[in-house]
């Protein structure tokens, strides 16, 4: 009988969830879901100097936004808790005593050190292959500081043992630490988990992505209004691919295809342009109810008052294919919900300056007022018929009409916009514009 798959993501609560950390969590989650295993969220909060009060919430919110839900963790509990290292002191003491009885530790100026084995340590890594580390010259590792606080290497190993972690999937920057961890497993006479060190995420110039780099913080994507499924899809492709050059992948299929054996050995290059492209594809193609759900927080934050839910849905349908970031939704739809909108001065100077513009708008208003049907097709036919009778180019009616009813020179299809705004709003706005700009 094979060992049940149990994996973990163990971030430090620093108030910042890096896309590299999010990608590590995602790969662990995908591996767990692919193998019907368990995904554990453990908080490594032993280093008090790096902690922030709201930092755990940042981790929880970021992962949940991505759709990465854990099976065991600090807020959920589980059989192997507690899931905060700061609450596991008694467990670490027990393991320290075990090492002490074996003569594997000693005190040095108040610190507790582990006697390093003076022999090579082999790491058999699923991604990186078999790597041998020569530890013959390694200094003895501190596992407890003089102030009583624990060092990462020791508690990390103890927690993985206690939580029955079967696979440790983490960034390649931890690979050199793994030989230290295996030495601890050997000293405790416990079989280590399988290790898989996934490639680092680099900037386009080849430098390692840091907190200061563009696109490095998951919070940025949340604040800017990216589709969570698009960011998740993009992170899946940083170091892994389905091997058929597809880029837009449904998460259910990704879970089905995900395999650590297919993780690339070479480092991944972070390309924000590709992430933006993928995000645009997701926003444009997603079902309207999902687009509405993602847009609502930004609409509410902008103070747009929505009294007719069906009207909002129709408005969002109009602009959906134009949206690149959800934070831009309020700017695209604001004039649908207020009569107190501004006219773009540059557009006014360009569109309303010519002779006869207001006269043409007046004739368009009369034409629209007398229409029996109010739909995009009828509105388009009526405008084109009027243009021929005036005569003028259709653009000489389209551009002033758009500016009159929205205050701007761009937007969704004019005729569909007029249909959704409705006869009363359109006629009122045309009349108000004519009065305002007739000299």
Image: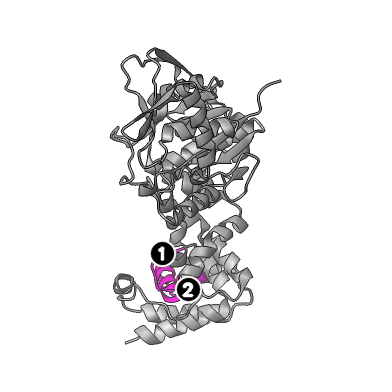
Vertical arrangement, residue 162 with respect to residue 74, above or below:
above
Residue placed under numbered mark 2 in the picture: 303
The residue closer to the viewer here, 439 or 8, is 8
Q: Quadrant of the C terminus?
A: bottom left
Give the left or right position of residue 305, taking residue 128 as reference: right
The residue closer to the viewer here, 363 or 64, is 64
Q: Residue at x 52, y 47 (%)?
A: 63
Q: Quadrant of residue 204?
A: top left
392 in magenta: yes
Residue placed under numbered mark 1 in the picture: 410
371 in magenta: no
The magenta-colored residue range is: 383-411
Residue 377 showing in the rendered view: no
Mark 1 vs mark 2, CA separation in Å: 22 Å
Residue 104 in percent (x, y) is at 44, 22
Q: Considering the whole magenta stretch, tell me its main secondary structure.
A: helix
Give the left or right position of residue 324, taking residue 82 as reference: left
Question: Does label 1 or label 2 sit earlier along the sequence?
Answer: 2
Q: Quadrant of residue 411?
A: bottom left
* Mark 1 crowd level (few <14, some 14–19, many ≥20, 10 Å Cα): few
* Mark 2 crowd level (few <14, some 14–19, many ≥20, 10 Å Cα): few
């Amino acid at each position: 009988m094979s060992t049940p798959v149990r994996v973990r993501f163990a971030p430090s609560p620093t108030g910042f969830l890096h896309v590299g950390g999010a990608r590590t969590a995602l790969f662990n989650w995908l591996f767990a879901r692919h193998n019907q295993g368990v995904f554990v969220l453990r908080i490594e909060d032993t280093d008090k100097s790096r902690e922030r009060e709201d930092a755990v919430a940042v981790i929880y919110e970021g992962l949940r936004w991505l759709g990465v839900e854990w099976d065991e963790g600090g807020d959920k509990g589980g059989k192997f808790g507690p899931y905060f290292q700061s609450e596991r002191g008694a467990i670490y003491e027990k393991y320290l005593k075990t090492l002490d009885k074996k003569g594997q530790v000693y005190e040095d100026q108040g610190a507790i050190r582990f006697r390093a084995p003076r022999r090579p340590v082999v790491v058999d890594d699923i991604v990186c292959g078999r790597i041998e580390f020569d530890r013959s010259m390694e200094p003895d590792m501190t596992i407890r500081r003089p102030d009583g606080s624990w060092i990462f290497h020791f508690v990390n190993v103890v927690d993985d043992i206690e939580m029955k972690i079967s696979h440790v999937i983490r960034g390649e920057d931890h690979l050199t630490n793994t030989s230290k961890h295996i030495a601890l497993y050997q000293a405790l006479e416990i079989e280590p988990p399988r290790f898989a060190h996934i490639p680092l995420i680099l900037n386009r110039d080849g430098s390692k992505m840091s907190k200061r780099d563009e696109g490095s913080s998951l919070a940025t994507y949340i604040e800017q209004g990216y589709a969570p499924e698009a960011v998740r899809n993009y992170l899946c492709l940083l170091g892994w691919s389905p091997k058929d050059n597809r880029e837009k992948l449904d998460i259910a299929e990704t879970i089905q295809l995900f395999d650590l054996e297919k993780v690339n050995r070479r480092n991944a290059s972070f390309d924000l342009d590709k992430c933006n492209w993928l995000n645009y594809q997701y926003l444009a193609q997603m079902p309207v109810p999902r687009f509405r759900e993602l847009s609502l927080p930004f609409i509410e934050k902008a103070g747009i008052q929505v009294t007719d839910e069906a009207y909002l849905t129709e408005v969002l349908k109009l602009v959906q294919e134009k949206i690149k970031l959800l934070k831009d939704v309020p700017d695209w739809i604001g004039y649908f919900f207020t009569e107190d909108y501004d006219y773009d001065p540059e557009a006014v100077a360009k569109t309303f300056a010519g002779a006869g513009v207001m006269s043409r708008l007046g004739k368009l208003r009369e034409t629209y007022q007398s229409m029996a049907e109010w739909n995009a097709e009828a509105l388009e036919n009526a405008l084109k018929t009027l243009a021929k009778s005036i005569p003028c180019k259709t653009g000489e009616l389209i551009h002033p009409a758009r500016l009159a009813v929205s205050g701007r020179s761009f937007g969704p299809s004019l005729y569909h916009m007029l249909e959704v705004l409705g006869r009363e709003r359109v006629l009122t706005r045309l009349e108000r514009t004519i009065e305002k700009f007739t000299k």
